[in-house]
Every structure is written in structure tokens, then in C-alpha cells.
Amino acid sequence: MHDIPNTELDALKAIQEILSQPLPASERIELDQYPVGYYAENEIVLALSLQFCDLGEIPDALGYLSHLQRLHLTGNRFMSLPDALWQLADLRYLSLGENQLTALSDQIGNLQRLRQLFLQRNQLTELPASIGSLERLHTLDISDNQLAELPHWLGNLRRLAFLTVSGNHIQSIPESLVALRDLVSLDLAMNRLAALPDFVGNLFNLKELRLSDNDLSALPPSIGALINLRELHAVNNHLIDLPESLNGLASLTRLCLGDNRIASLPESICDLTRLTDLDLHNNQLMSLPDSIGSMKRLVHLDLRSNKLMTLPPSLGDLPALETLDLRRNRFGALPRCIQRLQQRGCAVFL
């Protein structure tokens, strides 16, 4: 520490005084090997990690670390944060997850260089509107809070690529989100969504969409426009059927639709030729499309707990299939295609 300027040294000493363990220096700015530690470069402290330290407060001296770019404060007992934190204008990464925060200061808008913000597992009921001015924000995690709605200003975050809002009480999605054209991952799981808006089909760069554990009764036809989507998760909803447009998901590799009420599959689902994982467990399926054999890359197929009495012969033509789960269905005689799959090494669970 002896080469660090006195003001920053004082800040580190003040922080050390509230810790029950040493504050070691790290060789990497990410501090991924150090739940507790700091990183300095050219005698300037650039990163600080105080994770899972059971801290209830942090000293105002934190403000002396004026060049700080990464601040990890996950897993403490913070109910509030010092104003000094919001003066750290060089911050690019701020992790405040797993604390006891019920509100955030509007001064968070001062952090104009912020690219990654993690607020998961707190007790937030609303977010300050000033977050909407953080134009460089790339990642925002507000999961597992007490949010009843998403603010319209989220649409201002045009560079946002990763948005995680799972585990809240969200009932609808604001139309302003249509502006998030750079969005790659959208996690809306474990909320109270009854419908997915049509404009979701305009989020052309989406690669991952998570909708599990909501109250959805249908997926909008516009979802078929997501040509770059690779994973779609909609487990544990109230889906009865699927849109024919599903075959537009040309890049899809994983489709998880278990724990719904789906009675039949559109023939178009068999056009998803890049699909490797298909989970349809615990639905109301009585049959499968005849052309399912065209899904040549399918590796895992889960059909547990449906009402299947027979299977299409083409199922035995799936060359990449490694696991097929058919438990808790209504088969009488064993379908012939099963024997063909077993002979070439597919694990079939009956």
C-alpha cells in the first residue's frame, strides 16, 4: 500500500478498520478470486471488493477512492449507502446485490460511466428515474426485489444488452422497451405476466428469452420474428397451444415448455432444425407431429407426464437423439420407433 496516495491510503485504512479480515491486494481488476480485496494500478486504486462481509455501513472515506472503476458490495446488510458512493464518477461496475436496500438515491444518476449495475435480492419497491440517464449501461439486474411495475424510462437505456427482472411482481411490460434494440438477454421469469406484448417481436437481437413461472396463456405470433433467439424458456405457465409462427425461430437450440397445458403441437415446430433440447414435460399432449423426424439435431427430448398413446414412426429417425423421456404417459404396446432408438444407443426412459 505504501505507493498509494495518502488520501486513497486513508480510505483503505478506514475500510480495513470495519473488517474482521485482511484487505489483500489483487493482481486482477476483476477481483474474481477475492471476495475481499482491492486492485491498484500505477499507484491508483481501481477496484474494491467487500463481498459477504456482514457490513451494515461503509465509511464516507470511500469517496477518496475517486478513480475507482469497479465496486463489489454484494452480500452485506446495507439498508442505505453513503452519499460519497455516488461521487465515484469513474465507476463502470457496481454490485449492490443481496443487501437490505429499500430505496436508492437519485444521485445514482451521477455515475454516467456505469456499464454494469447489479441490484438483485434487495427489497426495492421502485427505482430512481435517474438510472434512465445512464446511457452507457450494458447490464442491469434488478431481480428478486419487490417491484410491482417496470418504469417507462428503461427504454432510454439504448445500449442495454442484458436485462434481468425475474422474481418481482411485474404484471405488464411497458411499451418503451421496444427501443432496446441491442437487448441480447431478457429475463422476465417468476413474475405475474398474463400476456407478452406484440412488440417483443421487434427485439431482433434477442438470443435468450426467459418467461417461466408467470401466468401466460399464449405466446404472441410476433415471437416468430426473433430470428436470432437461441433459448426460449416458458415453463410453468398456462399455455394451451403454440403459434404457427414458432418456425421463424431459425436459430433456436433450446425450447423449454414444461408444466403447461399444451394439448397439441403445430406442425411448424418441426422446422426448428437447429433445436438440440426440447422440454415438453407435464403437458396435455396426446400426439406428436408426424414430421418430428426432421429435427435432426435434437439431442434431448422430454415428454414425461403427458397423455401420449402412440408415437410417430419418424421419431426413430432422429440421428442425434441421446435421451428420450417417456415416463408417465399412456402407452399400451411399445412403439416400434423406440426399439430403433435404443439399438443405436439412445437412452429411453419408460
Image (tube, helix red, strand yellow):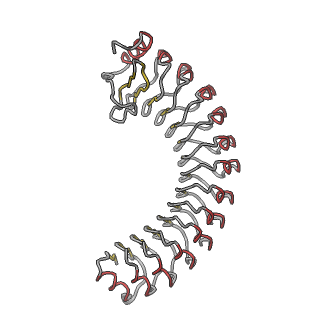
Q: Position of residue 157 (x, y in %)?
A: 63, 41
Q: Residue at x 59, y 36 (%)?
A: 136
Rendered position, 72 above or below 291: above
Q: Position of residue 350 (x, y in %)?
A: 34, 78
Q: Is residue 120 above or below residue 264?
A: above
The picture places residue 120, in percent across and down from the top left corner, at: 50, 40
- Count of residue discs: 0
Q: Nearer the viewer, residue 342 or 159?
A: 159
Q: Nearer the viewer, residue 164 or 189?
A: 164
Q: Nearer the viewer, residue 285 or 291?
A: 291
Q: Residue furthest top?
A: 6
Left/right placement of residue 107 relative to residue 345 reads right
Answer with the quarter of the image where residue 35 lies.
Answer: top left
Residue that sits furthest to the front in the current view = 42
**Residue in the image at 35% along x and 21% along y:** 19
Whether residue 217 is visible? no
Q: Based on the displayed image, in which of its 4 quarters is residue 192 positioned? A: bottom right
Whether residue 68 appears in this view of the structure is: yes
Q: Quadrant of the N terminus?
A: top left
Residue located at (53% from left, 25% from top)? 90
Residue 286 is left or right of residue 106, and the answer is left
In the image, residue 29 above or below residue 7: below
Which residue does the image show at 58% across and 65% down from the upper left? 238
Indicate the position of residue 214 as horizontal and vertical percent values: 57, 57
Q: Pick whichever, 213 or 204, lies toward us.
A: 204
